[in-house]
Image: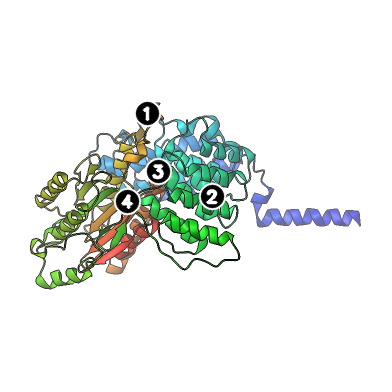
Amino acid sequence: MRTSLSLAVLCALALAWVVDPSLAQDKEKVDKRALSEAYGPVKAMIADKKLVDETVAQIKKCDGLLDYKAAIELLGFFEETDRAWDSAEGDKNAPKEAKGRPVAAYKIATAILDCVRKMAYATEVIKFAEEDDLNNTEKYSLRPRMAMLDAIARNAGDDEACMKFLLEYCRDAENKADTDLRILAIHHIADYPSNSEVPVILMVALKDRSWRIRDVAIDALAKVAGKTSEDQIILALINQLAVESGKLRENLRNALRKITGERLGTDSDEWSEWFKNKKRSEQGLPEKKGGDKGTRVKVFKTESFSDRYVFVLDTSVSMLKKITDEEKEKLKKSITGEGDEKDPRRPLDWSLINCKLDLAREEMIRSLEVMDPEKTRFTLITFAEKVTVWKEELMPTEPKIVNEVADYLRAIKGGKTTNIWGALDRAYDLSEQIAGVDTDKRKPKKRDKVVTGPHRDEALPDTIYLYTDGWATYGKYAGDDKNWQKFSQEEKSKMYHAIMKEMKEELKDRNRVSRMTIHCIGVGDPQDNYTLKDIASMTRGEYIAIGK
């Protein structure tokens, strides 16, 4: 009987191995043979600069097989593949190895990061921390270091060393953690609500000097609240709402709404009263709802609490084309604020609006005019095929400066094509640059040791308004009308949306750290409503279609 049982167990194990060989694999021991077979050809394929799709397919075969050594070697190819477009455009700061690569080589860079994120051997993954690669900003730019931390977080659920490191990085007790990666670490610990340390770390992070740390902590607390310490989390969010300013008031309101189902606006007093009544079971919920404190401003149909903006305006030739009376009437009907008694802005002077860029300028200016110059800062990025930054730092909304930017926009001459990615990429670079990143080298600059006073994040933009009338026709991620002429419209659409999907994935990846809200304003018809809507949705913004 005992022999029969043993045979049955052996048979079951053998069957499990046939069904899923990974069950028989030692998770702590690298499968050197499988790794050699999958990774062996990769280096030569990357060296052949013309191979893109084949190289991507081969790298994908390495998913779950990489050891530390192979991962480090693979990450060494990231910059030269990711910056092929920069090299083709003559960027002198692009790696020399990027020269001659097709623009689509960014797909190889994406596959490299995905492969590192999917590393399955915890003993290999933790070496990123042990060897201090995460803080090696001289050797690695931000996105490769993010992938390393992603791999550690992915293994933290099953590995004590990975979890210990992740939690300690979030705490940053010695104030040595990189702010960007600490934001990402806090994002990840929300996946482990059963760990008793997680809610405590998140509630402490609500008081951090960096608004981005506070922002990611708000989202993380909203995610874990239903699974642990809900009342403590609600009270912590209410208390933070009482002292917070800018965009984060809106995010706190949304988090409290998500947890409680209540719609009490941004008035912390209303939330406090609600919480007290919630704890007194003999009383019902208060009848009064919707108290609202905080500074709002309208831009098109959106309402924003932010006080740090980047306006990104399309200046391609179609934006400067004179609009017909019929088009103007359609635009008039689309603009919220006309006749709205609660809107503090002056009415639009439609006699000044003869093209779509005129509308963008006048709408932006009348919004800036009512913003508090003591608190609110902004800058402007314009784009056609070329991307231009008006000011490299955020400027106060003083009348003199608002008039200056209006004159600047009136003098613009349109370009032929639409480089949407280039403009958004520059907005993110600007944020990183202000935070202390040398964006030419994609590496952080050396930072001072001062830890008192405002955190440098307080100078960073937190909200982008993207205003465009068209589709992406130029840049790293764009359609290619010239080389797509032989394809049908349906085929062109499929190829274009596949490229836009890749653009959105990179944008989503970078925004995990930058924490910016992007409101997308599409003007006229046609417009790429699918892409604009997705960008807004994944960054907690709104998509507004005007004149469509």
Which circle's residue, 2 or 3, is located before the other in the chain? Answer: 2
**Quadrant that contains the C terminus:** bottom left
Residue that badge 1 annotates:
447
- Tell me which corner region of the image, top left, top right, bottom left or bottom right, holds residue 97: top left
Q: Secondary structure at mark 2?
A: loop
Quarter of the rendering occupied by the N terminus: bottom right
The disc labelled 2 sits on which kind of residue? Ala
Label 3 Cα crowd, 10 Å radius (few <14 / some 14-19 / many 20+): many
Q: Which residue is mark 4?
A: 306
Q: Which residue is mark 2?
A: 190
- Residue at horizontal 59 percent and vertical 50 percent from the top: 193
Disc 2 packing (10 Å; few <14; some 14–19; many ≥20): many
- Left/right placement of residue 106 relative to residue 394 reads right
Dot 1 or dot 4, earlier in sequence: 4
Q: Label 2, label 3: how many angstroms apart (C-alpha)?
A: 18 Å
Location of residue 533 (image quadrant): bottom left
Q: Where residue 366 sits in the image (x, y, percent)?
A: 18, 56
Disc 1 crowd, CA 10 A, few/some/many (<14, 14-19, 20+): few
Of labels 1 and 2, earlier in sequence is: 2
Residue 521, how many percent across, how many down? 26, 60
* Dot placed on the residue nearer the N-terminal end, 3 or 1: 3
Which residue lies under the disc numbered 3? 211
- Earlier along the polypeptide chain: callout 4 or callout 2? 2
Disc 4 on helix, strand or loop?
A: loop
Q: Calculate the distance from the C-alpha at mark 4 to the C-alpha at mark 2.
A: 25 Å
Residue drawn at (28%, 64%), measured in percent from left and top? 544
